[in-house]
Amino acid sequence: MAAIADVYVTVLPETGRIADGIKKALRDADDDVRQAAKRWRRDIDRELGKPEVDVDADTSKAKREVEKLDSDLVGQ
């Protein structure tokens, strides 16, 4: 059979409803993320409470080492 012409047709699906579904899914995910973040913050705050830290460092050894290094470098 002889062909007079070849025809190429582009088929575009109806995407209007798909876009609405995607928007809704993203909004729902956003709400879930916000709720999870609030829950995590409460959990972290509860676990940490009010930590009290006392820092008592003796820096005399480090100071001696810095002074020795300084004198060694100046002597070179």
Image (cartoon, rainbow, N blue to C red):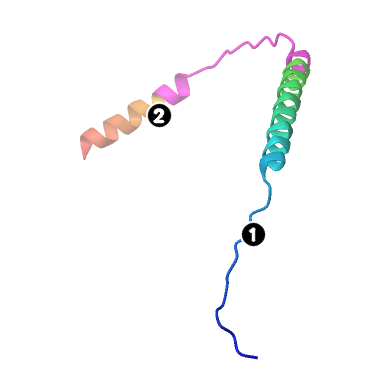
Q: Is residue 72 magenta?
A: no
Mark 1 vs mark 2: give the one in front.
1
The three-letter amino acid code for the residue at tag 1 is Val
Query: In this view, which residue lies farthest toward the bottom?
Result: 1
Q: Secondary structure at mark 1?
A: loop
Question: Which residue is tagged 1?
Answer: 11
Q: Quadrant of residue 31?
A: top right
Q: Observer-nearest residue: 68 or 2?
A: 2
In this orientation, which residue lies closer to the viewer: 71 or 34? Answer: 34
The magenta region covers 45-63
Percent of width and height locating residue 4: 56, 83
Residue corresponding to mark 2: 65
Magenta stretch containing residue 48, yes or no?
yes
Q: Relative to the observer, which residue lies in front, 56 or 49?
A: 49
Q: Which image quarter holds the C terminus?
A: top left
Contact, CB < 8 Å: mark 1 with mark 2?
Answer: no
Where on the picture, by quarter, is residue 37?
A: top right
Identify the residue at image location x=54%, y=16%. 57
> Which label's residue is closer to the chain start, 1 or 2?
1
Q: Amino acid at mark 2?
A: Glu
46 vs 26: above or below: above
Quarter of the view holding residue 27: top right
**Residue 23: percent from left, percent from top:** 68, 33
Residue 47 point in image, percent of width and height: 78, 17
Side of 62 where 35 appears, left or right: right
